[in-house]
Image (cartoon, rainbow, N blue to C red):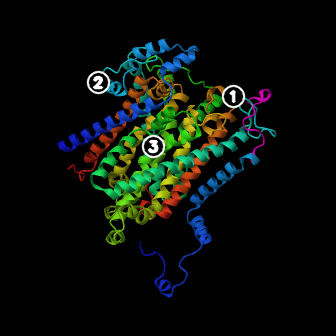
Amino acid sequence: MARPVGVPVDLVIVGAPARPGWGTHLARFVRRKPLGAAGGFIMIVMVLTALLAPWLQTHDPIATDAAYTLGRPSAEHWLGTDHLGRDIYSRIVHGAWVSLVVGLGSTLLGSVLGGIIGLLSAYAGGKTDLITQRLLDILQGLPLLVLALVMSASLGPSVRNVIIAISIPIIPRAARVIRASVLSIREMQYVEAARALGVRHLRTAFRHILPNTIGPFIVLCTAQLGSAILVEATLSFLGMGVPEPYPSWGRMLSVSAAEYAQKAPHLVLFPGIAISLAVFGSNLLGDALRDTLDPRLRGSR
Amino acid sequence: MKSYVAQRLGIAILTLVGMSIVIFALLRLAPGDIVDILFSTAGYVNDSEKQAILKELGMDRPYWVQYLDWMRQIVTGDLGKSYRYDIPAWDVIRPLVPVTVELAVLSILVAVVLGVPTGVISAVRQDTLLDYVLRIVSLAGLAMPSFWLGMVIILGMVSWLGWIPPLTYVKPTDNFKAHAIQFMLPALAVGYRSSALIMRITRSSLLEVMREDYIRTAWAKGQAERVVIWHHALKNAILPVVTVIGIEFAFLIGGLVVTETVFNLPGVARFLVQAILWRDYPIVQNLVMFIAIIVIFSNLFVDMLYGVLDPRVRYG
């Protein structure tokens, strides 16, 4: 690890507490990265909404009301009702759960699988590495959405399958990031020392190298979360994502904009705003975390 | 250079073969096939009829025979028959290609025209209010699903201008103005998103170059700002931008799947969804391969372009 930058030398010598607590870190993050903090705030609100959905709802999100279809926003239905008379506010609140579970689930699954592949591939090096890279090229050569689309169609519609379908295109991207980071860590002296002490290969890889990739891993996850949420919305929009009765933001949008433009624009506007806010929040947070945890990547995409 | 191109082409072809195996396997894993779907719409199941149809479509053969048959078809240029339409797959795909290509080219044009100048402005005016506004606008572009943006554009056009989107595709030869509007709106929706990426990469790449010594020399010589930025700095900052444009062009196709659906354009991407739902294997596997070929070769093209843009890049 590099010498801590910005810590005065005399402080280190005297042995003053150089490790500030969580609160100090948080306060500094908010002060230095106001946009990132805003993103974090949006994500916290989203998580709370998802967890507290049953208490936040004003109506049953799947109950239809034939007498009150395409209702405008009112005191009774805050964001109006859809073409089946379902309350849009309650559906959006519950949609946060679907969006979060699928987004987080697929990001974690893809990043962990990709991370392990990247770790082993980089650690093994040589031919193994080369062949793994070519295999990952195959997965990465298709647009994320097209691959997720074919995957989701072949697995059939369910929450679990959508998570798997979205995680597959994330694997090669995660493997690349972790591989790059392992390649440099592998050459460090402490790894050589561990090997010289007779530590086995697998243990060296998982015990000594893996923990040091946690920074890039967190950056990777937050960076992928936004696109995973977007892909879920898109798949559901196309009718290949999360099935009924789960209220998904994407599927709430699968109505004809031209048809409802006059009668009920809220049907098109609100779910889209929810998706955009969620992705916006995770992107902001991801950018700020990347700048904080990985200064080498600062300013790049 | 020649051996490098040959090597890259070899790898590209191997990658494409790998993709064909993945796609083929994924489709065969899918529950249900065209025959099941036909019978479920007909509402009855007749086992001997089912076997007859499977045999007629060649789906009763072992998978590896079917795969080799598909490879033979690709090599000979005959893509087989669509299960659903019972006409050659190529006749189904061919009219869709120009629509998607036109939309993709327009979108990337929108993205470059919006993205590069705003990226330059943002870098030159770093940390000013203008920079913050442009960055937030571009972040918003990354956050909004392009299909939703398309819906909002339609919404706005309908409620303010009373414009109703045409329900069918308008040929440029029939009515050029209607055709232009029909394509410009989705191109804006898709291009805005890509422009955000291009803007960010232009900004960061230019910021890096602006700190170099030769730029300081240019300032010290008293060069005009316009010359320093557009002539000296941007020339060296453009390489990563070209990479992103290349990647984006390939990945635009993915974004088009939904945008074509929203705007009712008969393109490759929208048709892909239909074909997947119908388990129309000859159409799906050839369409996906078509997209894969575009992705691989646009990446290759970008790498080749490096040598032209930056003489320091040598291919070994």
Counting from the top left corner in percent of width and height, residue A288 is at 53, 59
- Residue at the outermost left position: B2
Majority secondary structure in the magenta region:
loop
**Amino acid identity at mark 2:** Arg
Question: In this rendering, does residue B140 appear at all?
Answer: no
Which residue corresponds to mark 2? B72
Q: Quadrant of residue A24?
A: bottom right
For image coordinates 22% across by 42% down, the residue present is B7
Give the mark toward the camera: 3 or 2: 2
Kindly check if marks 3 and 1 are in contact, taking CB atoms under 8 A apart as contact.
no
Q: CA distance from mark 1 to mark 2?
A: 52 Å
The chain to which mark 1 is attached is A
Counting from the top left corner in percent of width and height, residue A287 is at 51, 56
For image coordinates 39% across by 43% down, the residue present is A140
Q: Quadrant of residue A203?
A: bottom left
Is residue B237 or residue A171 the one in the foreground?
A: A171
Counting from the top left corner in percent of width and height, residue A30 is at 60, 64
Which residue corresponds to mark 1? A262
**Amino acid identity at mark 3:** Pro
Q: Is residue A59 magenta?
A: yes
**Mark closer to the chain start, 3 or 1:** 3
Label ID, residue A169: 3
Give the mark toward the camera: 1 or 2: 2
Is residue A63 or residue B131 the one in the foreground?
A: A63
Q: Is circle 3 on the same chain as circle 2?
A: no
Asked if A65 appears above or below A105 in the picture, the reply is: above
Is residue B316 or residue B164 the one in the foreground?
A: B316
**Amino acid identity at mark 1:** Gln
Is residue A224 or residue B58 the one in the foreground?
A: B58
Tell me the magenta residue range: A56-70
Kindly check if marks 3 and 2 are in contact, taking CB atoms under 8 A apart as contact.
no
Q: Is circle 1 on the same chain as circle 2?
A: no
